[in-house]
Image (cartoon, rainbow, N blue to C red):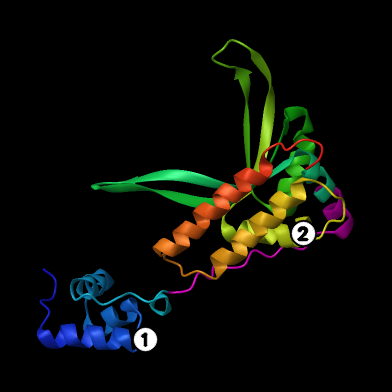
Amino acid sequence: MGKRLTDQDIHSIITRYQNGGHPSDIAAVLGIHFGTVYAVLKREGVPLTSASYKPFVPEPYILHVDPVWAAEFRGFFYADGSALLAREKRKRPGKEPYYFYKPVLGIHQRDDEALLIHDVQDKLGGHLSSAGGYHRNGYYTRPTMRWSIASYPRVRGVLEAVLLGGCLPARKRADIDLLYELILARYRMPRYLRPEDKAVLVDYYEAIKAVKRYKGAGG
């Protein structure tokens, strides 16, 4: 059974929190679970402030890539790559489902380009997958391979190492720049997203979808 909180404990939680203490640190001092701290704050009507959330500072993903290879990859990615913000619906027992957003870079090729796809993975990391064969409608497709890399630090690392700063007026540069803008915005948010932070991610999700729509030769 958990510790029974006294009025003095509750007062201590509120005072420490309002003085800038993080719930995890407060819980450690009082010998309780950090969820209990949040429960007390909510019950007592204490507003949660962004300063009390741990910042979103994941381990950086640092790449050292040959400049010539990076330039060739950037042009190849402009033609055949994809830069997007993926949205996954996740369910929680007894609670409303929620959406999880993560940046993704990917390249999809026939499997006779396997040597190239493996080289990309060797240089940048990421995940390889394969597909092909008969589809439900009866048509046959050639086997394919896909390279992809996801998560905020990994995608940021690839963008900063090889994809940012191109000079060709490729349409895909807009996708890349917007995805990078999103990642920098996420790094300014706390680790645990507030409602206003989630709203920003939704806005970027819609903006990245919009920039991918075909707009004709004029734009």
Question: Hey, what amino acid is under mark 2?
Answer: Leu
Residue 61 drawn at (x, y percent): 64, 63
Question: Residue at 78% across / 37% down in the picture?
Answer: 115
Number of the label disc, if any, that sits on residue 35: none
Write the residue at 85% across / 59% down: 66
In reply to whether residue 167 is colored magenta, the answer given is: no
Give the magenta part as a residue range: 54-73
Answer with the quarter of the image where residue 214 lies. top right
> Up-down: is 48 above or below 130?
below
Residue 133 visible in the snapshot: yes
Horizontal relation, residue 18 to residue 146: left or right: left
- 66 magenta-colored: yes
Report which quarter residue 117 is drawn in: top right
Question: Residue 169, percent across and down?
Answer: 85, 50
Q: Is residue 104 visible?
A: no
Label 1 to label 2: alpha-carbon separation:
38 Å
Amino acid at circle 1: Gly
Circle 2 Cα neighbour tier, 10 Å, few/some/many (<14 / 14–19 / ≥20): some
Residue sitting at 30 percent across and 47 percent down?
96
Report which residue position mark 2 lands on.
164
Secondary structure beneath label 1: loop
The quadrant of the rendering that contains the N terminus is bottom left
Q: In the rendered view, would you say 56 is above or below 176?
A: below
Residue that carries the numbered disc 1 in the rendered image: 20
Tell me: 152 left or right of 50.
right
Q: Secondary structure at mark 2?
A: loop
Answer with mark 1 or mark 2, whichever residue precedes in sequence: 1
Q: How many marks?
A: 2
User: Looking at the picture, how far across and down is residue 111, in whole percent?
Assistant: 73, 29
Residue 60: image quadrant is: bottom right
Residue extending furthest toward the top = 138
